[in-house]
Amino acid sequence: MTQHFYSTQTHLADKIAQTVYGQYFVYVAGEFDASTNDPSSNPKIIRELWCRVSVGELIYANIWFDHKQKLKAIALNNDMLSDDLKTAIHLQILDAEIADAFPVVYIIPRDNIAPSRIRPSDFEAQNYPDNVEYIIPDLRDSDDFIKDRTPCEESPDL
Protein backbone atom coordinates (compact mmCIF):
# COMPACT_ATOMS: atom_id res chain seq x y z
CA MET A 1 0.00 0.00 0.00
CA THR A 2 1.32 3.42 -0.89
CA GLN A 3 1.94 6.09 1.69
CA HIS A 4 -0.27 8.65 -0.06
CA PHE A 5 -3.63 9.25 -1.63
CA TYR A 6 -3.78 11.27 -4.86
CA SER A 7 -6.50 13.45 -6.30
CA THR A 8 -6.53 15.87 -9.22
CA GLN A 9 -8.65 19.03 -9.10
CA THR A 10 -8.86 22.12 -11.25
CA HIS A 11 -7.46 25.42 -10.03
CA LEU A 12 -11.04 26.74 -9.98
CA ALA A 13 -12.37 23.89 -7.80
CA ASP A 14 -9.36 24.20 -5.49
CA LYS A 15 -9.87 27.95 -5.12
CA ILE A 16 -13.59 27.62 -4.34
CA ALA A 17 -13.02 24.80 -1.85
CA GLN A 18 -10.28 26.72 -0.06
CA THR A 19 -11.85 30.18 0.02
CA VAL A 20 -15.53 29.30 0.41
CA TYR A 21 -15.93 25.90 1.99
CA GLY A 22 -12.70 25.78 3.99
CA GLN A 23 -12.36 22.09 3.16
CA TYR A 24 -12.27 19.80 0.16
CA PHE A 25 -14.54 16.94 -0.93
CA VAL A 26 -12.23 14.68 -2.93
CA TYR A 27 -12.19 11.36 -4.68
CA VAL A 28 -8.78 9.80 -4.16
CA ALA A 29 -6.76 6.90 -5.53
CA GLY A 30 -3.93 5.09 -3.82
CA GLU A 31 -1.56 5.75 -6.71
CA PHE A 32 -0.93 8.74 -8.95
CA ASP A 33 -1.00 6.53 -12.03
CA ALA A 34 -3.71 4.12 -10.93
CA SER A 35 -3.51 2.07 -14.11
CA THR A 36 -6.05 -0.54 -12.98
CA ASN A 37 -8.64 2.17 -12.34
CA ASP A 38 -11.25 3.54 -14.69
CA PRO A 39 -9.64 6.55 -16.45
CA SER A 40 -12.02 8.86 -14.56
CA SER A 41 -10.51 7.50 -11.32
CA ASN A 42 -6.87 7.86 -12.38
CA PRO A 43 -5.29 11.11 -11.10
CA LYS A 44 -2.57 11.05 -13.79
CA ILE A 45 -5.07 10.77 -16.65
CA ILE A 46 -7.28 13.45 -15.09
CA ARG A 47 -4.25 15.75 -14.79
CA GLU A 48 -3.43 15.22 -18.47
CA LEU A 49 -7.03 15.99 -19.42
CA TRP A 50 -7.13 19.24 -17.41
CA CYS A 51 -3.79 20.25 -18.92
CA ARG A 52 -5.32 19.94 -22.39
CA VAL A 53 -8.42 21.86 -21.32
CA SER A 54 -6.37 24.64 -19.69
CA VAL A 55 -4.47 25.37 -22.90
CA GLY A 56 -7.69 25.66 -24.85
CA GLU A 57 -7.80 22.48 -26.90
CA LEU A 58 -11.29 23.03 -28.29
CA ILE A 59 -12.24 19.36 -28.29
CA TYR A 60 -12.41 19.63 -24.49
CA ALA A 61 -14.56 22.78 -24.26
CA ASN A 62 -17.65 20.82 -23.18
CA ILE A 63 -15.74 19.21 -20.32
CA TRP A 64 -14.85 22.65 -18.95
CA PHE A 65 -18.44 23.85 -19.32
CA ASP A 66 -19.78 20.73 -17.58
CA HIS A 67 -17.23 21.09 -14.77
CA LYS A 68 -18.29 24.67 -14.08
CA GLN A 69 -21.96 23.65 -14.14
CA LYS A 70 -21.21 20.89 -11.63
CA LEU A 71 -19.42 23.31 -9.30
CA LYS A 72 -22.34 25.70 -9.58
CA ALA A 73 -24.90 22.96 -8.85
CA ILE A 74 -22.97 21.82 -5.77
CA ALA A 75 -23.07 25.36 -4.39
CA LEU A 76 -26.70 26.05 -5.26
CA ASN A 77 -27.84 22.79 -3.66
CA ASN A 78 -25.90 23.39 -0.45
CA ASP A 79 -28.45 24.48 2.16
CA MET A 80 -25.68 25.52 4.52
CA LEU A 81 -24.55 28.37 2.25
CA SER A 82 -26.17 31.79 2.37
CA ASP A 83 -27.63 33.26 -0.79
CA ASP A 84 -24.82 35.83 -0.81
CA LEU A 85 -22.20 33.09 -0.69
CA LYS A 86 -23.97 31.16 -3.45
CA THR A 87 -23.96 34.33 -5.55
CA ALA A 88 -20.25 34.85 -4.86
CA ILE A 89 -19.47 31.30 -5.99
CA HIS A 90 -21.63 31.73 -9.07
CA LEU A 91 -19.76 34.94 -9.99
CA GLN A 92 -16.40 33.23 -9.41
CA ILE A 93 -17.46 30.48 -11.82
CA LEU A 94 -18.76 32.97 -14.39
CA ASP A 95 -15.46 34.89 -14.22
CA ALA A 96 -13.37 31.72 -14.58
CA GLU A 97 -11.19 31.55 -17.64
CA ILE A 98 -9.94 28.48 -19.44
CA ALA A 99 -6.61 28.79 -17.60
CA ASP A 100 -8.53 28.07 -14.36
CA ALA A 101 -8.87 24.49 -15.60
CA PHE A 102 -5.15 24.08 -14.77
CA PRO A 103 -4.71 20.89 -12.72
CA VAL A 104 -3.71 20.77 -9.08
CA VAL A 105 -2.67 17.34 -7.78
CA TYR A 106 -3.30 16.74 -4.10
CA ILE A 107 -0.74 14.45 -2.48
CA ILE A 108 -2.29 13.39 0.81
CA PRO A 109 -0.28 11.45 3.41
CA ARG A 110 -2.40 8.46 4.48
CA ASP A 111 -1.21 8.80 8.07
CA ASN A 112 -2.77 12.29 8.25
CA ILE A 113 -6.28 11.03 7.53
CA ALA A 114 -8.10 9.01 10.19
CA PRO A 115 -9.67 5.85 8.73
CA SER A 116 -13.07 7.06 9.99
CA ARG A 117 -12.82 9.99 7.53
CA ILE A 118 -12.31 7.75 4.49
CA ARG A 119 -15.34 6.38 2.68
CA PRO A 120 -15.57 3.87 -0.13
CA SER A 121 -16.27 5.49 -3.48
CA ASP A 122 -19.83 5.64 -4.74
CA PHE A 123 -18.55 5.10 -8.30
CA GLU A 124 -19.01 1.70 -9.90
CA ALA A 125 -16.43 1.02 -12.62
CA GLN A 126 -18.04 -1.99 -14.23
CA ASN A 127 -15.30 -2.54 -16.81
CA TYR A 128 -12.55 -2.06 -14.23
CA PRO A 129 -12.95 -4.71 -11.50
CA ASP A 130 -9.69 -3.64 -9.83
CA ASN A 131 -10.77 0.03 -9.56
CA VAL A 132 -9.79 1.35 -6.12
CA GLU A 133 -11.05 4.78 -5.19
CA TYR A 134 -12.12 6.43 -1.94
CA ILE A 135 -13.81 9.63 -0.84
CA ILE A 136 -12.45 12.05 1.72
CA PRO A 137 -15.42 14.38 2.30
CA ASP A 138 -13.63 16.80 4.61
CA LEU A 139 -10.00 17.20 3.57
CA ARG A 140 -8.58 20.27 5.31
CA ASP A 141 -5.45 22.36 4.96
CA SER A 142 -4.53 21.22 8.48
CA ASP A 143 -4.16 17.68 7.08
CA ASP A 144 -0.78 18.83 5.73
CA PHE A 145 -1.24 17.66 2.17
CA ILE A 146 0.74 18.95 -0.80
CA LYS A 147 -0.74 20.76 -3.77
CA ASP A 148 1.44 20.00 -6.76
CA ARG A 149 1.18 22.62 -9.51
CA THR A 150 3.82 21.26 -11.87
CA PRO A 151 3.49 23.00 -15.26
CA CYS A 152 1.71 20.90 -17.85
CA GLU A 153 4.73 20.68 -20.13
CA GLU A 154 6.59 18.88 -17.30
CA SER A 155 5.88 15.55 -15.68
CA PRO A 156 5.28 15.81 -11.95
CA ASP A 157 7.78 13.92 -9.82
CA LEU A 158 5.30 11.90 -7.80
Image (cartoon, rainbow, N blue to C red):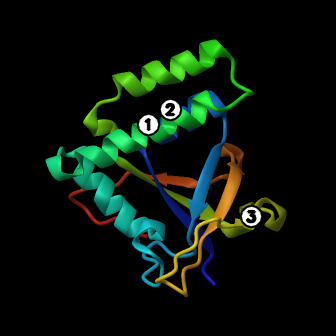
Point out residue 44 in the picture as x, y percentages from the top left corner: 38, 68
Looking at the rendered image, the quarter that the C terminus falls into is bottom left
Judged from the image, the secondary structure of the residue bearing numbered disc 3 is loop
Separation of residues labelled 2 and 3 (CA atoms): 25 Å
Q: Earlier in the sequence, mark 2 or mark 3?
A: 2
Q: Which mark is residue 118?
A: 3
SS under mark 2:
helix
Marks 1 and 2: in contact by CB < 8 Å? Answer: yes
Crowd rating for badge 3 (residues with CA inside 10 Å; few <14, some 14–19, many 20+): some
Q: Earlier in the sequence, mark 1 or mark 3?
A: 1
- In the picture, residue 130 is in which quadrant? bottom right
User: Callout 2 environment at 10 Å: few (<14), some (14 to 19), or many (20+)?
Assistant: some
**Which residue is most to the right?**
116
- Observer able to see residue 136: yes
Q: Residue at x 25, y 49 (%)?
A: 53
Q: Nearer the viewer, mark 2 or mark 3?
A: 2
Work out whether residue 151 can be spotted.
Answer: no
x and y, in percent, of residue 139 in the image: 68, 50
Residue 108 rendering spot, x and y as whole percentages:
61, 61
Residue, disc 1? 69
As rendered, which of 101 and 3 lies closer to the eye?
A: 101
Residue 153: quadrant of the picture? bottom left
Q: Is residue 35 above or below residue 56?
A: below
